[in-house]
Image (cartoon, rainbow, N blue to C red):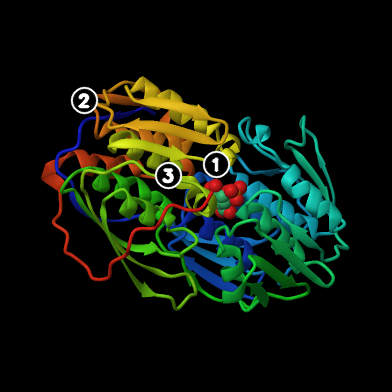
Amino acid sequence: MELRVKRAPRIDLEITVPGDKSISHRAVIIAALSNGVCTLRGFLPSEDCMHTVNALRTLGVRIEQPEPDTLIVHGKKRVLTPPKKEIDCGNSGTTMRLLAGLLAGQTFESRLVGDARLSRRPMDRVIAPLGKMGANIVAEGPEETPPLRIHGGSLRGIRYGLPVASAQVKSALLLAGLFAKGKTTVEEPVPTRNHTELMLNYFLVRTVKDENDTVTVFGDQVPESRDFTIPGDISSAAFWLVAAAVQPRGHLLVRDVGLNNTRTALLGVLLRMGAQVREAIEDVDQLEPRGIVEVTGFPLKGTVIQGREVPQLIDELPILAVAGALADGKTIIRHAGELRVKETDRIAAIAHNLRTMGAQVSELTDGLEIYGPAPLHGARVASFGDHRIAMAFGIAGLFAEGETIVQDADCIRESYPRFETVLEEFTNPKRMQISTPVIGSLSPAPVEEA
Ligand code: S3P
């Protein structure tokens, strides 16, 4: 599939976005370990999350899907069945790393495989600490890359300082910790998304968090079965929020979206760049905050994104780079070396595509310098097989002269089925809806200390 995009007319829209990808993975994994039947609503039926669902089915968990976004998970009270075949994680790094943690706690042997892209991504970050807990994990690819052969069981709790800020690694260790003797403590260099901790707590599993970005889980606990409704994905909303923010007088209201503050750093950056942003948390009953975000566009100015902010908007950096190209002055992104080991090398991909569309960009080892405002022109750009690169450049096309074509855009299905349909609404003024203002406002986030 190709995305073909033309310049957007004035944006004035009200939308919802599909369920949060990170929360969907965690909800189904923890429900599968629980002691009863759990109904999960608002589940993201994207390719990545369905790889997690199918992996759990291979491990003997019964999961019904009466609607695309509803799962009925029959919890196995922590007792998984040895898989009869290898477990396919597709291109989902979250599936592979979280399952590595889960399978490290099982006495049977399992093998996790991925597609060609996932097979190039580093797994030493989970292999080393899970090995310290007592699991034997062998990476069959060169330099500790997939497939992973896991022989687990008899784990002991450890205290582990993460060398890189990664919610996937933290989550793998917490899931393994559920099956370990004693307590497992993870220290983070800077805080990352805390969905695993919240989901465990929601299922009445005890964890302890201290002020120094440290979280502890105690072994031998059985999650208590509960129903859960997954909020919309702020990382999917980010594409549309940026589109509204960069268009003077553009206006967008996103309803029923996740507003967990380990995920909303994007909003502070848009404010700092000069957009008007309001958020209203409407519900925290299921521990994950959810509510409304409203953005009004202004001529934006460049900014610096670095330090502790980076892990809390790591998935939003491709679209923020597009915002930087359209903003006045220099935008600097640094301390974001992790972008080089995502679904593609996102630093190289962003620099390549922005240059193809006429922007001036310098690549840093751990980030980018982008000189705006660029008069973007339509061009043929590559997705690099990366869903967030494809979507970010679909949005760039809304602000370019002429037509932009994003090639190989099928990868968008990994996180955002029907993205193209919403994109169409942004380019077709006949279908615009008028949105209503909401209360609650934010102040701009200061630039983080380096
Ligand atoms: C995710 C964590 C992030 C993020 C990814 C999803 C998660 O990866 O980029 O899209 O669900 O835990 P890292 O933890 O490797 O930074």
Residue at figure coordinates x 67%, y 78% from the top left: 206
- Picture quadrant where residue 156 is located: bottom right
**Residue under numbered circle 2:** 401
Residue 258, horizontal then vertical, whole percent: 41, 63
Position of 10 with respect to 300 (left or right) is left
| Front one among 325 and 251 | 325
Neighbours of disc 1 within 10 Å: few (<14), some (14-19), many (20+): many
Residue at figure coordinates x 77%, y 29% from the top left: 142
First in sequence: mark 2 vs mark 3: 3
From the viewer's perspective, is the residue at label 2 or at label 1 nearer?
Answer: 1
Q: CA distance from mark 2 to mark 3?
A: 27 Å
Residue 92, horizontal then vertical, whole percent: 59, 44
Neighbours of disc 3 within 10 Å: few (<14), some (14-19), many (20+): some
First in sequence: mark 2 vs mark 1: 1
**Residue under numbered circle 1:** 336
Element under disc 2: loop
First in sequence: mark 1 vs mark 3: 3
Position of 154 with respect to 373 (left or right) is right
Residue 421, horizontal then vertical, whole percent: 29, 42
Up/down of 212 relative to 170, above or below: below
Which amino acid is tagged 2?
Glu
Which amino acid is tagged 3?
Val
Residue 146, horizontal then vertical, whole percent: 72, 37
Residue at figure coordinates x 55%, y 72% from the top left: 38
| Front one among 232 and 329 | 329
Q: CA distance from mark 1 to mark 3?
A: 12 Å
Up/down of 291 relative to 84, above or below: below
**Residue under numbered circle 3:** 304
| Pointers 2 and 3 in contact (C-beta within 8 Å) | no
Element under disc 1: loop
